[in-house]
Image: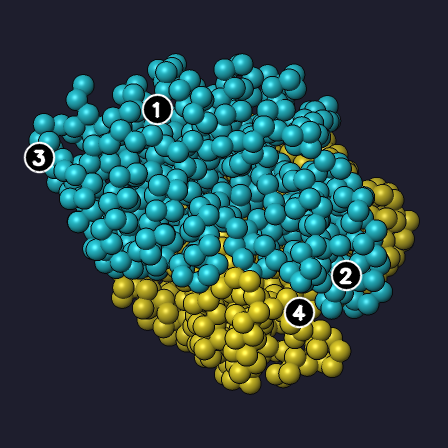
Chain colours: A cyan, B yellow
Amino acid sequence: MSRIPTGLQSRIMSAEQAAALITSGMTLGMSGFTLVGYPKAIPGALAASGHAKNLTLCTGASVGDDMDGVMARAGIISRRYSYQSNKSTRTLINEGSIGYIDMHLSHVPAFVNRQMGGIHIDAAVIECAAITENGLIPAASMGASDAFVRVADKVIVELNETIPLDIIGMHDVFEIGLPPNAKPIPIVHPLDRVGLNYIPCPPEKIAAIVVTQLKDKSPAFTEPNEISRVIGGHIIDFLKSEVSAGRLPQNLLPLQSGVGSVANAVLQAFADSGFRGLTMYTETFQDSALDLLDQGVVLGATTCAVSFSEAAQERFYGNLAAYREKLVLRSQELSNNPELIRRLGLVSMNTPIEVDIYGNVNSTHVAGSAVMNGIGGSGDFTRNASLNIFATESVGKKGAISCIVPMASHVDHTEHDTQIIVTEQGVADLRWKTPLERAELLIENCSHPDYRPMLRSYLEQAKKTAKSQHTPHDLSQALSWHQRFLETGSMK
Amino acid sequence: MSRIPTGLQSRIMSAEQAAALITSGMTLGMSGFTLVGYPKAIPGALAASGHAKNLTLCTGASVGDDMDGVMARAGIISRRYSYQSNKSTRTLINEGSIGYIDMHLSHVPAFVNRQMGGIHIDAAVIECAAITENGLIPAASMGASDAFVRVADKVIVELNETIPLDIIGMHDVFEIGLPPNAKPIPIVHPLDRVGLNYIPCPPEKIAAIVVTQLKDKSPAFTEPNEISRVIGGHIIDFLKSEVSAGRLPQNLLPLQSGVGSVANAVLQAFADSGFRGLTMYTETFQDSALDLLDQGVVLGATTCAVSFSEAAQERFYGNLAAYREKLVLRSQELSNNPELIRRLGLVSMNTPIEVDIYGNVNSTHVAGSAVMNGIGGSGDFTRNASLNIFATESVGKKGAISCIVPMASHVDHTEHDTQIIVTEQGVADLRWKTPLERAELLIENCSHPDYRPMLRSYLEQAKKTAKSQHTPHDLSQALSWHQRFLETGSMK
């Protein structure tokens, strides 16, 4: 089949011509999620031209440097919404040059759909594999693209010819509707298909089509080190103990696994775990997940995006028709939806920056002020999963930072939400534990031996000075570790 | 009809005899929510006897002093789960004598149902209006009673003869099921009935029936003062502006209103607002809500409990048959369910203890260490509502405390979750605002003039010293207001 209907051939133009449709002050809704399926030609054209300034850029989640970085460095982005993980963008946010609003990923499409707080998407820019009479066949991520297309004044398509057309049928696009007319989402299994395999879009809304052959920048996974292997082992052991206790089925419940190398390593641990017949319901699907699928450990998955290294990308695109039976690509409005996360009863696994002794988790900020990436989907999953796990090395920066601290310098997941904390030192099961019991478990089981006596000493001092023994804090010292790190480069 | 089936008459016994079925170390699941529908005779008997010690008490939410206070003061409670608002219980928690685990109310029944983390309910003690061949007709709160009855080894009923039998048909009990077999909840309107009007309970599980005529301790509402009237006015004006902007329907979306006098006063403001045809989907239904129902301003509501003054109680019980058409009593698993809160698109209104300049909200702790009540349903509603509002006076303790602070001393609702902050000073609309924009709005629109220069000065100092302009904090001063309050009794 042709990738573009005859009636739309006239809208084909260069990236520069399409970029000219974007003007200063616009709010752009762009496709892309975990470095996949984002526009690659128009961002470059916008950056080179510089005619459109003061843009607000809203994406599903993180996109490649050839989009986020290129546009940020050109100085044309004044506001950036939802999740990012780009070095240049992060630097400009922390310098105060780009205003950043860090949101739960499930909120983004929901807020855009009902134009919450007056947000309006002037133009949607969406990477697609094809355009049909009825709408768009997205690339290998869904993100918030369906919402952007729905509400945008105009749609600009980057049509990527490198994506095999066998991707048609992998997406599942379901419109929930707006309150008071929103509908139940009839998904009861990760592989249920309940919607369309394209994003509905009237042809007249498509203002431009730019044909590209630009591949996604593959994320670089570091090979798992000994420490992440130990962490993965702890998680497997913990899940086995839950199965033994009759609290999880033999094939567990659908797994969610976060972004990045630690998450990738943790998932690798499932390969030799003995677990079989697993499913996943997750926002991103990395190399190790593809391995588990190929090994038959994982039977199938919902994901909002695939996010593969170059080798895994080749494997995936080379066997799309087969993977289409086992993978469903859904919008983040569904992949991260509390209704579905709770109904399916996910086991979520995410990576914190730091955890405090009472189980509050910081996922976003360094020493309270500087943002790292963003909360992403970790809030959606943690709050609603039937079992949530945060896994991290117990120390960072070669021991200069303890990941277990007296008080989190920024809180993204509260004590009411967190359950299982894992480091290479061990596991703290915080369920049904009081704040003081949590502190004991986190200090004894999870903190690094170098910091353990300091944490014990903080807790004793807090118990002595605080006016309550419920969550005793010594406010004069609670953030002193972070202050010391800022002043000396080490928490020690 | 008789309130007790013939076959169960033999299980009638005194409160003392029923209390004897409870032994040391047991975990009790007791009915009750916002001071309504809790057992009143057995707690007293347990306290008087003292034979059963080291009890773990799990409730839906807050219960009267004749249960929570009496048992706490008797020293027989070692652990207390989910929400409480009792003075004695609070004191013992903060002294470290009672271990308290403060949970999202939607989590409690979900965790109990699947015995998450190994929790087991030894005995459910449930206040009822009647027992039928099929199960229990609860009193005027549902709380987590259906979950407690489902999983408990035995059920003890306090049968309250003062509750008119016209209450039969007001409850709606729906079993979601456990993952991986959980079902969609088919509710699309607050008044939809989708389940049974009783809690299923096999007769053989009922170990004891204690007949009582003890009324709920009515909550005392203070008459709204001028400040809460101003706050209510700000909220009405804000909602009208949302309607004018086409962002809310004329009859809004279902309202949720929190517990207590401020919430009651805010709801009163709807009476003369001009709004009509409203609905509510909420966890508690207070006097002012009953007034709105009688005035026809509110057409109907789902609630987990009614929580009325003595006068409103009389009005309610005197016209139960009529109110049954307009009120649905559901378990907190449904009233607080993210699936339903998001689908129905609630407008939530809750009361914080303090809000920091970046919009993080503390709902539970005083100066970081001492717990006040608990998070209750505020997390469930805030995260999932289509519009969430936190309303508070700008100062507390006659001006000694600012409710807008540099950094929250405990975080229950993160910057990712909060939207609209209201004080008597004005409204801060935080939607799509960066942290620094939020700080400007909160300081200029919401903080008290006495504290405004101090907040401005903190922010300027933070911008100068922090390593990032994203969320600039001066960690050496961030909690200094709370320290000063602890040392001098004032934040000034």
Q: Is residue A217 visible?
A: yes
Element at badge 4? loop
Q: Residue at x 12, y 40 (%)?
A: A204
Sooner in the amino-acid sequence: mark 3 or mark 1: 3
Report whether mark 4 lies on the same chain as mark 3: no
Report whether mark 2 lies on the same chain as mark 3: yes
Give the number of the disc on residue A10: 3
Determine which residue is flagged by label 4.
B476
Element at badge 3? helix
Callout in the foreground (4, 1): 4
Parent chain of label 4: B
Quadrant of the rendered image containing residue A370: bottom right
Q: Residues within 10 Å of mark 4 (few under 14, many from 20)?
A: some
Q: Residues within 10 Å of mark 3 (few under 14, many from 20)?
A: few
Determine which residue is flagged by label 1.
A170
Q: Residue at x 60, y 51 (%)?
A: A362
Callout in the foreground (3, 1): 3
